[in-house]
Image (spheres, rainbow, N blue to C red):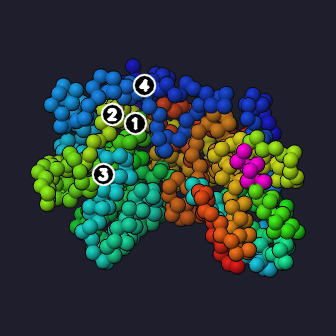
Amino acid sequence: MTTTRAGAPLDTAAIRAQFPILSREVHGRPLVYLDNAATTQKPQSVIDALTNYYSTMNANIHRGLHTLAEEATAAYEDVRQQVAAFIGASSHREVVFTRNTTESLNLLAYTLGARLRPGDEIVLSAAEHHSNLVPWQLVTQRTGAVLRFIELNDDQQIDVDTARAAINANTRIVSVVHMSNVLGSIAPVSEISEMARSVGATMIVDAAQSAPHIPVDVGDLGADYVAFSAHKMLGPTGVGVLWGRQELLADLDPFLGGGEMISVVTREESSWAALPHKFEAGTPNIADVIAFGAALDLLNEVGMDAIAAHDADLTHYAVERLSRLEGLDIYGPSDPADRSAVIAFNYRDIHSHDVATILDRSGIAVRAGHHCAQPLMRTLGVPATARASFYLYNERSEVDALVDGLLEAGERFGFAR
Amino acid sequence: MGSSRESQNPIDLDDLYRDVILDHYRSPRNRGAREDATVSAEGFNPSCGDEIQLSVAIVDSTVNGLGFGGSGCSISQSSASMMTDALTGRTLESAREMSRHVQQMLTDDTFDLDAVDLGDLEALSGVAKFPVRIKCGLLAWKVLDQALANATGESVSDDSDIPTRVTSG
């Protein structure tokens, strides 16, 4: 059993037993997987769901009149209901499946961007992943709209004041990252949504990092649209979610045209299918959506409150242990309570690629580089950082392994332990 | 260096982090732009952000000296530092040949080191055993190729994932 009440520590041994990859070795050492912000590992139930789909019900969905098509369609649409419940959506019609967060954000940039005029302002934050920056840069090139940025405060956080400084009467769209994939900081999204609403702007939240780690309720966020990816929350790659308020999605033009998204097609024109199918042109990623359902089952079983508490505990512990190392700089909010599950750092004058290579030889997987956030790296004044990120199956002993690995890297570069 | 645990690994970190590499990383040679440069070029590795700027002084088909700048990991920076030492005083032809050999060595872990004399640069031979780090070692040499091609009026086929460009010359 892995069921745990909020606040009680997770039974990580029982959880780990469900993830086959966690028992493998890397370079002769047990794998210590601390690259969860990039993608998470998959439980056996997700792997089984994929196999089961292809073994027992593979068919194209929505169109077929045979039993397999009926079963596959039901399984696919069940996951849509599950996602809706997971994020507190008021209807499954508000849940659109895409390829990933990037595609969800591009869908919005393409459709909402078409309505912008020269001088209209799009507000992003200084901490955006390239996926919530580049699509909007393309919009500005097409429309003459301009980008404005919510800056970080002195504690490297987006706060209400820095948001207020960027949002004004010209703002048409506000699109911000909920939890930074570099700083681990959590933006005050509901307050920013309030500001966006007060100037009549559309509010978009990039929840790629937050949805896996903290309870995300679209109603609480107060946003118009929310985007996230299955693969960062135990699900397979190739599935993204776009949630949008039903009346807003209904009012948007389609993004991709093709089969599945239409109602009536003549030689000259077409009418669109009902939500959410209007935004799901072509055969979707049926197998991976269905397997995503198994991932959500596990997250629900363990409980998002319990996962958030576990991640917070590990983050506290890691910040405490890492900050005791001489020459170690941690980026992001100074108080561990203001961050979750992601710790970007640099150690001594050792470049993060060297750190990552040396850690890898001890079986420890971390990310190194710019984390698809080059402008943020420039703001922080560093070319690159190493990054450790945690999830429900990580343990304190793995933080200890990270610290040992860093000391080893230091030794190799001539620093005494 | 080299704990007992590491020695159990078939590919040892010592293959990558040779003393001479760490020495060039900590004490880079010829750092900074050369005022007498006849051609300058730069390149970067988009996947990781490493960057190298190179200035080369060429007189009568001879490399009189090189200077480099940039930032990145120990492999990218030491590769550039060793290159500036190794190429000084060489003819353009000899510099090109060395570039070819080093790039072969970096990308092929069966490269025969005995067939050539690469001096300190042989320390980079271990990089070929670490596929994700090969681009780090190559960066400076791709920039060099760009600079030398410009100096002789040729063009470089840009088929690598490492964009380079001439900045002056």
In the image, B113: left or right of A216?
A: right
In the image, A187: left or right of B40?
A: left
Magenta run includes residue A6: no
Disc with the residue nearer the chain's start (2 vs 3): 3
Check chain identity for marks 3 and 1: say if they share one.
yes
Q: Which residue is mark 1?
A: A236
* Span shown in magenta: B101-108
Q: How far from the left and from the top, in percent, is residue A9?
A: 45, 29
Three-letter residue code for mark 1: Pro
Q: Which residue is mark 3?
A: A226
Magenta run includes residue B105: yes
Q: Which residue is mark 4?
A: A44
Q: Which residue is mark 2?
A: A287
Three-letter residue code for mark 2: Ala
Mark 2 touches mark 4? (CB < 8 Å): no
Asked if residue A68 is positioned above or below residue B153 in the image, the reply reads: above
Check chain identity for marks 2 and 4: say if they share one.
yes
